[in-house]
Image (cartoon, grey):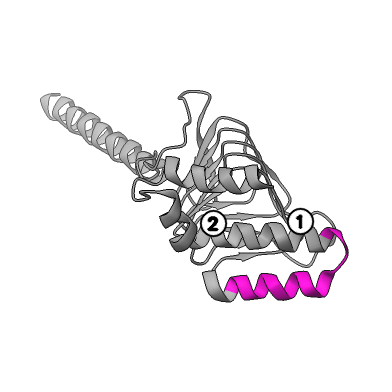
């Protein structure tokens, strides 16, 4: 237990350049507080003490702005940075060394029963405001871009951006846990650029055609 608590603090020191020492993380980081409260609530949930587990999870939500259902399974070294508005559903499963930014939702898509929330594998980064909805798997070492809405399974070593989320990089680059989650490819912008280039090419061809017609 103490090793897990130490890991929860150490990952903040590694990932957040603003964190200066363990005492500061212990006192001031709501993400750490939410994770610790969840670990206690999850223990109660497994003991079938459902009401008390939900009660303390709601207290944690009120104090931290982070909502984690007691039934969710969370691995080691989860880092929730500026966690206001983060929602993690009941059947969600999160692996080790996962990073989640503010406004992220790991939720369901309706009133279905059973497994209805995502499974997030190890070493995944989910950037600000991303929504991952439904019972699907986010593969290891993947990155979900800011504001993306992910509705389908994501292969390992992938980068996903857009609404709905599209895989724009897979196995092409090394995916790491850094804070530079805004410099990601934009498939919509790329498509507009391609269309603009195509229009310019067609205009040039039309000019050449008109010149040939005049010369004849």
Tell me which corner region of the image, top left, top right, bottom left or bottom right, holds residue 60.
bottom right
Please state which of residues 154 and 96 is positioned toward the viewer in this rendering. 96
Q: Position of residue 61 (x, y in %)?
A: 59, 71
Mark 2: secondary structure: helix
Give percent across and percent down for residue 86: 55, 62
Numbered range of the magenta stretch: 46-61
Identify the residue at horizontal 34%, vertical 45% (top origin).
17
Q: Which of the pair 214/146 is nearer the observer?
A: 146
Q: Badge 1, how many Cα within 10 Å: few under 14, some, many 20+?
A: many
Quadrant of the rendered image containing residue 107: bottom right
Residue 88 visible from this viewpoint: no
Q: Is residue 49 magenta?
A: yes
Quadrant of the frame with the C terminus:
top left
Instruction: Provide the residue designation for mark 2.
Output: 32
- Single out the mark in the foreground, 2 or 1: 2
How far, Cα to Cα, is label 2 from label 1?
A: 21 Å
The residue lying at 65 percent from left, 39 percent from top is 121
Q: Is residue 112 left or right of residue 200?
A: right
State the residue in front, 25 or 199: 25
Disc 1 is placed on an element classified as: loop
Q: How many marks?
A: 2
Residue 95 drawn at (x, y percent): 66, 41
**Going by the image, does 46 lie left or right of 69?**
right
Q: Is residue 193 visible?
A: yes
**Residue 11 % position (x, y):** 50, 43
23 vs 210: above or below: below
Picture disc at residue 91: 1
The answer to whether mark 2 and mark 1 are in CB contact below 8 A is no
């Amino acid at each position: 237990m103490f090793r897990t608590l130490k890991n929860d603090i150490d990952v903040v020191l590694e990932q957040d350049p603003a964190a200066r020492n363990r005492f500061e993380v212990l006192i001031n980081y709501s993400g750490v507080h939410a994770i610790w409260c969840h670990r206690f609530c999850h223990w109660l949930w497994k003991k079938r003490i459902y009401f008390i587990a939900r009660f303390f999870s709601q207290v944690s939500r009120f104090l931290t702005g982070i909502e984690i259902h007691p039934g969710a399974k969370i691995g080691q070294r989860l880092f929730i940075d500026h966690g206001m508005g983060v929602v993690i559903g009941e059947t969600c499963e999160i692996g080790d060394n996962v990073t989640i930014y503010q406004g992220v939702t790991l939720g369901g898509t309706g009133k279905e029963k059973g497994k209805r929330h995502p499974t997030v594998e190890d070493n995944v980064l989910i950037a600000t405001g991303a929504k991952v909805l439904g019972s699907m798997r986010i593969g290891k070492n993947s990155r979900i871009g800011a504001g993306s809405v992910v509705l389908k399974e994501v292969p390992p070593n992938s980068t996903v951006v857009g609404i709905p989320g599209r895989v724009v990089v897979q196995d092409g680059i090394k995916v790491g846990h850094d804070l530079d989650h805004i410099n990601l490819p934009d498939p919509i912008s790329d498509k507009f650029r391609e269309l603009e280039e195509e229009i310019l090419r067609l205009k040039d061809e039309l000019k050449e055609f008109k010149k040939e017609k005049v010369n004849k």
